[in-house]
Image (cartoon, rainbow, N blue to C red):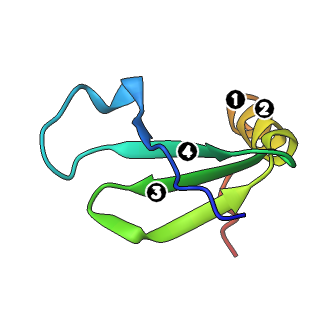
């Protein structure tokens, strides 16, 4: 069954008007997260809650820095 996604704006978007925010939607089981930017709503990033939590933890810990060769 295909459910319509309910998009929510990030609270970190500053309540900006127009295309200035990140949006999140959740699909039912198995839980899947969908992220997009308002200015390019057709471009979606789809992931699981666990994978996103690991990414955010790595960012907070400073483990994801750009390597310079």
Other-residue count near label 4 (Cα within 10 Å), few / some / many at <14 / 14–19 / ≥20? some
Element under label 3? strand
Q: Which residue is mark 1?
A: 60
Other-residue count near label 1 (Cα within 10 Å), few / some / many at <14 / 14–19 / ≥20? few
Q: CA distance from mark 4 to mark 3?
A: 9 Å
Q: CA distance from mark 3 to mark 2?
A: 20 Å
Q: CA distance from mark 2 to mark 4?
A: 20 Å
The vertical placement of 17 against 65, above or below, is above
Instruction: Identify the residue at horizontal 26%, vertical 62% (top origin).
Output: 39
Where residue 52 sits in the image (x, y, percent)? Answer: 75, 44
Along the line of sight, the residue nearer the viewer: 68 or 44: 44
Element under label 4? strand
Q: Residue 48 vs residue 22: left or right?
A: right
Mark 2 or mark 4: name the one nearer the start of the chain.
Answer: 4
Q: Nearer the viewer, mark 4 or mark 1?
A: 4
Other-residue count near label 2 (Cα within 10 Å), few / some / many at <14 / 14–19 / ≥20? few
Instruction: Identify the residue at horizontal 61%, vertical 56% (top origin).
Output: 3
Where residue 24 sits in the image (x, y, percent)? Answer: 51, 43
Instruction: Identify the residue at horizontal 52%, vertical 55% (top origin).
Output: 4
Mark 3 or mark 2: name the one nearer the start of the chain.
Answer: 3
Along the line of sight, the residue nearer the viewer: 7 or 38: 7
Instruction: Identify the residue at horizontal 48%, vertical 43% (top origin).
Output: 6
The vertical placement of 34 against 14, above or below, is below
Q: Which residue is mark 4?
A: 25
Mark 3 or mark 1: name the one nearer the start of the chain.
Answer: 3
Q: Which residue is mark 2?
A: 57
């Amino acid at each position: 069954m295909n459910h319509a996604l309910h998009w929510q704006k990030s609270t970190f978007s500053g309540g900006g008007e127009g295309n200035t925010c990140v949006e999140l939607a959740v699909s039912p089981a198995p839980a899947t997260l969908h992220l997009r930017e308002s200015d390019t709503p057709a471009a979606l990033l789809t992931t699981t809650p666990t994978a996103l939590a690991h990414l955010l933890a790595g960012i907070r810990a400073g483990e994801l820095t750009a390597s310079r060769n």
